Every structure is written in C-alpha cells, then in structure tokens.
Image (cartoon, rainbow, N blue to C red):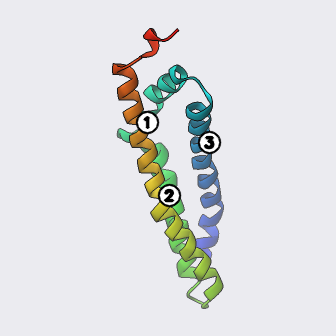
C-alpha cells in the first residue's frame, strides 16, 4: 500500500492536468470560431503526436496508469473487493472509452486542420 500512497497524489495531479488540456481543447474547438481552432490546433497538435513533445501527455498518462495498477495491487493484500471493483471500473473506463476518445479527438483535429488548410482556410474567411 505504501507504493500506492506515494503515487496517489500525483495521479490526481496528472488527471487534473489532462482534464485541463481536454477542457481547453473543447472550449477552443466548440466555442470559438474556426480560424481560432485552426490556429490553436496548428500549434498544439504537434505537441501531442511528435517526440519529445508528446511527453506532455505520455508522462501524466504513465503516472495515472501506475496509480491504477498500484491501486489494484494494494486492493489484493489485504483483499478489498469493493476497492478492487472501483479500481477495475476506472481502469476499464480509462483504457476503453478514454483511449478511444483521445484517438478520435486527435484524428478529428488533424482532419479538421487538413480540410481547413485546403478548404476555406483562415485567409479566405472574413
């Protein structure tokens, strides 16, 4: 349990950090004009998909993963079925819909940037 106790606060910080990135991207893309979204994604997308800038997402994701794994391990000794169940639910949500959402958001933003650059484009819109 000591390994989990050491990682748990960092897991919360990393989750908050990634939630901030997601919230910023949603506000810019859903609430702002297309030209602002294009400018924002043109700058931010490379930091998600190129090395070493991708560490901005990969490092917090690794901390969260280690927190979930250590949480599951600490639920086994002494056996705590309720905590293990919640840890398993968290792991399934992060690995399934969470990962799918990230992949879909990045691929959607890349497609948007490509179509915006070749379509209306920022210089062609008033």
Instruction: Indicate the quadrant containing the N terminus: top left, top right, bottom left or bottom right.
Output: bottom right
**2 shown above or below 11:** below
Q: Where is residue 50 in the image (x, y as percent from the top left)?
A: 35, 38
User: Which numbered dot is residue 23?
Assistant: 3
Q: Going 59% across and 81% down the picture, which residue do you hit? A: 85
Q: Where is residue 115 in the image (x, y as percent from the top left)?
A: 36, 27
Q: Going 37% across and 21% down the picture, which residue do you hit? A: 117
**86 shown above or below 35:** below
User: Which numbered dot is residue 42?
Assistant: none
**What kind of element bears circle 3?**
helix
Cα distance in 3D space between marks 2 and 3: 14 Å
Residue 47 appears in which quarter of the rendering? top left
Q: Earlier in the sequence, mark 1 or mark 2?
A: 2
Regarding residue 46, the answer to whether it shows in the image is no
Q: Is disc 1 in contact with disc 2, using a CB cutoff of under 8 Å?
A: no
Side of 123 where 85 appears, left or right: right
Q: Is disc 2 in contact with disc 3, using a CB cutoff of under 8 Å?
A: no
**What kind of element bears circle 2?**
helix
Regarding residue 69, the answer to whether it shows in the image is yes
Residue 93 or 7: which is nearer the viewer? 93
Q: Is disc 1 in contact with disc 3, using a CB cutoff of under 8 Å?
A: no
**4 shown above or below 26:** below
Label 1 belongs to which residue? 109
Q: Going 59% across and 34% down the picture, which residue do you hit? A: 30
Q: Residues within 10 Å of mark 1 (few under 14, many from 20)?
A: some
Cα distance in 3D space between marks 1 and 2: 17 Å
Q: Going 59% across and 72% down the picture, which residue do you hit? A: 4
Task: Give the foreground label among 1 and 3.
Answer: 1
Q: Where is residue 35 in the image (x, y as percent from the top left)?
A: 51, 20
Label 2 belongs to which residue? 98
Residue 85 or 8: which is nearer the viewer? 85
């Amino acid at each position: 349990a000591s390994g989990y106790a050491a990682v748990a606060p960092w897991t919360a910080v990393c989750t908050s950090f990634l939630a901030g990135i997601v919230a910023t991207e949603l506000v810019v893309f859903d609430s702002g004009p297309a030209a602002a979204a294009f400018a924002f994604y043109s700058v931010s997308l490379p930091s998600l998909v190129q090395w070493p800038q991708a560490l901005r997402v990969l490092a917090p994701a690794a901390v969260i993963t280690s927190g979930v794994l250590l949480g599951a391990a600490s639920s086994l000794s002494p056996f705590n079925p309720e905590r293990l169940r919640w840890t398993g639910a968290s792991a399934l949500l992060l690995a399934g819909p969470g990962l799918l959402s990230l992949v879909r958001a990045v691929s959607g933003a890349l497609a948007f940037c490509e179509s915006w650059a070749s379509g209306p484009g920022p210089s062609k819109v008033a």
